[in-house]
Amino acid sequence: MASSPPAPRRARLHGLDAARGLAIIGMMAAHLLPVDVLVITVGSGLDASSERIVDGRSSILFAVVAGVALGLVTGGSAPPRERRWPARGRLVVRALLLIALGTLLWMLPSGIAIILDYYGVMFLLLVPLLFLRRRWLSTAAVVILIAATLARDAALSAGVVDEPAATLLDYALLGYYPALLWLPLLLAGLVLARSGLGSTRTRLIALALGTLSAVAGYGAAVVVPGQSAAAHSSTVPELLGSGGLAVAIIALLVMLLDAGDRSRLARLLLAPLSAIGRVPLTVYTVHVVVIALLAPLGPAGFFEPQVGLALWLTFSIGGAALGLVLGRLGWRGPLEAALSTISGLPFRARSVRDERTTRDDSEAPGRPGAVQD
């Protein structure tokens, strides 16, 4: 049995790396910078709240970027049918590894609401939806958002529940990054990837729709009584507002950095940001570990302004330097490489067998493609 031909090498989108890097430095800023910087007001009247611009939006941007990246690595706008089950399997393994790493990081005294294990749960929920057509992905995003919002309200009304239901509810509906409510964010990114992000038309439509969604979400919090778009509220206005903003940012950065020769200067200027986006798991994990080690000075969110700013700059500059050096060497970040290698191990043996079968078939006497003496 011959295997399918290898998939063509995918061109890396510098804009997507930059969006991922922006999300990482935003999350680090939320953990390290004083609470009175970059402050904005969300909502109006009694529903108004003051928060930093990096709060909530950075992690939502990372979620949408994750959806785009998963769509690209599984075939972009034309995912091959013959590689779908291995792709689902690799995603399951990757999700379990993220859950394990996130759980370990929760054990450290960092004071940070770790996001990795929640992302792992989101990835598991995404597995059966990964290769749906775009219209069904869009439909699923709307249905899940409505159903999860109703389920969350019902869970809040039900009150305290015992374990393990409490942990399941935390991951799915009530936690810092509720997987069911955030799944539409990943689906939005997946739709973007399936729409052909290399197309100028797709980028312009994404920019327009993302901006419209942001205006609708944040606008609803201003004009509709009882609606909130506060960070980490996981309400429909927040998810529409911050999710739309994330889509617009991705589209804008891809337009800026992935327009061929016209993007050379922009790529040079934003190279440090893109470099961080190539080693996000390593940078995120290291910054959590270091903050935990410095717990007597913190914890996260409560550092002295000078200390927090110095740490944020150190992590940002160090992450950019690491990404630039590894990129020059053609290497991945250490944790990125480990995650990719381990998630692919269960499927590597089959791939090798298929390659050997293909080679044997092509070399067999009397068969098409065989070279005979």
Image (cartoon, rainbow, N blue to C red):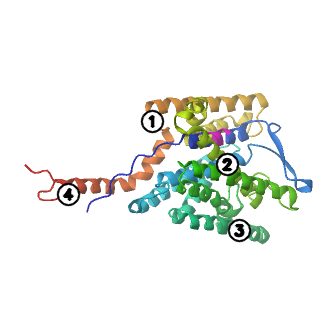
Q: Amino acid at mark 4?
A: Asp
Name the residue at 76% across, 34% down: 303
Q: Earlier in the sequence, mark 1 or mark 3?
A: 3
CB of mark 3 within 8 Å of CB of mark 2? no
Write down the residue under mark 4: 361
Q: Please, which residue is most extreme toward the right here? A: 45
Magenta-highlighted stretch: main secondary structure?
helix
Q: Earlier in the sequence, mark 3 or mark 2?
A: 3
322 or 202: nearer the eye?
202
Circle 3 SS class: helix
Q: Earlier in the sequence, mark 2 or mark 4?
A: 2
In the image, residue 343 lies in the stretch drawn in magenta: no
**Closer to the eye: label 2 or 4:** 2
Circle 2 SS class: helix
Mark 1–mark 4 Cα distance, whole angstroms, equals: 34 Å
Write down the residue under mark 1: 331
Circle 4 SS class: helix
163 or 69: nearer the eye?
69
Residues rendered magenta in the picture = 21-25
Write down the residue under mark 2: 248
Q: Amino acid at mark 2?
A: Ala
CB of mark 1 within 8 Å of CB of mark 3? no
| Res. 286 image quadrant | top right
Q: Amino acid at mark 3?
A: Ile
Q: Amino acid at mark 1?
A: Trp
Write down the residue under mark 3: 146
**Closer to the eye: label 1 or 3:** 3
